[in-house]
Image: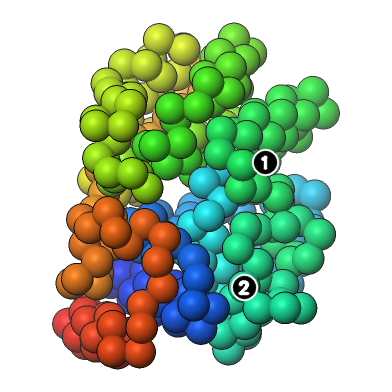
Amino acid sequence: MENRELARAANEIRKGIITEVYSGQSGHPGGALSSADLFAFLYEEEMNIDPQNPADPDRDRFVLSKGHVCPGLYAAMAVRGYFPMEELRTFRQMGSRLQGHPSIHWLPGIDMSSGSLGQGISAAVGIAQGAKLRNRDYRVYTLLGDGEIQEGQVWEAAMFAGTKGLDNLVVIVDNNNLQIDGPITDVNSPYPIDKKFEAFNFHVINVDGHDFDQLRAAFKEARETKGVPTAIVMKTVKGKGVSFMEDQVGWHGKAPNEEQYKTAMEDLERIGMAI
C-alpha cells in the first residue's frame, strides 16, 4: 500500500479515536493517537487478516497489551471494515461492544481480552508458542506502552520468548515518553529499552513510529529474522495529530469537551486535506 493511503487511514483512525472518547466522555486519547500510524500499518498492510472471516485459524494475531488505548484499535478495525464506523460513537456506553478495554467475548476480531498492564505480552507469547507447537505459520503482534514495561511480568514473558526462540512474535513498544503520572524517566525509567530486550535475546529495531517507510522496513526485517523474537521500539509523540494534545501528559486519559472536540476534528481535517 502506498504511504499516502496509509496516512489517510491513520488520519481516519485518529478521527475515530477523538469521536469515541468524546462520545463516551471517557477514555485514553493520548496513547491511542501516538499509536495510530502503527495501527494503520498493521491493519491495512502488515497483518494477514480478513474482516469477513475474523476467526480464520490461519490469521495473524494481535494483542493490545496496553488495552486502555483500545480507541485506536477499534478505529483501525472500523476503517478496515470489521464493523461500521458509526458504531465508534457507542464507545464505553451500556450494551456497546466497544468497551474501555477490548474483550474477546464481545467483538469479533479481538484476539485477546486485555487491560491489566503487563499481562498482554504474556498472552501473546503463549499464542506464539502455541503456533510453534502446532506447526502453524501465523504471526503474533503485541503493542506495549513504554510505561507498561515497568511491569515485571513483561520481562518474565520476554525471558520465555527469548529462551524459546519465538521468531513468530513481534513485540512493539510505543515509546512516547509519557505515562499517566508524567515522563517515564521521572516515574521509573525503563531506558535503555533496546538494550533490555537485547539482553533477553530479542532482535531489536528502533524506528520513528510515524514514518511508514521505517515501519515497513522494520516489519520486513522482523519477518526475515529467524531463531529469536523481534522487538520494535517506536519513538512517537503522545497525542499525535491534535495540536493541543501533542506531548501533553494531561491527555493520557481525559475526554475533550465540545469546543476541544471541534478543534481536534478541525486539526485532523486539515491534515487530511494536506495528504
Quarter where residue 135 is shown: top right
The numbered mark, 1 or 2, whose residue comes first in the sequence reads 2
Q: Amino acid at mark 1?
A: Tyr
Q: Amino acid at mark 2?
A: Arg
- Tell me: 170 left or right of 239: right
Q: Position of residue 250 (x, y in %)?
A: 29, 59
- Tell me: 167 left or right of 201: right
Is 26 in front, or is 44? 26
Q: Callout 2: helix, strand or loop?
A: loop
Task: Report if residue 17 is visible in the image.
Answer: yes
Residue found farthest to the front: 181
Is 215 in front, or is 124? 124
Residue beneath disc 1? 138
Image height of 59 relative to 84, above or below: above
Residue beneath disc 2? 92
Q: Which mark is residue 106?
A: none
For the point 61% across and 48% down, the residue is 115
For the point 81% across and 59% down, the residue is 105
**Mark 1 or 2: the one toward you:** 2
Image height of 210 relative to 193, above or below: below
Q: Position of residue 191 (x, y in %)?
A: 27, 23
Disc tally is 2
Task: Report if residue 45 is visible in the image.
Answer: no
For the point 53% across and 55% down, the residue is 68
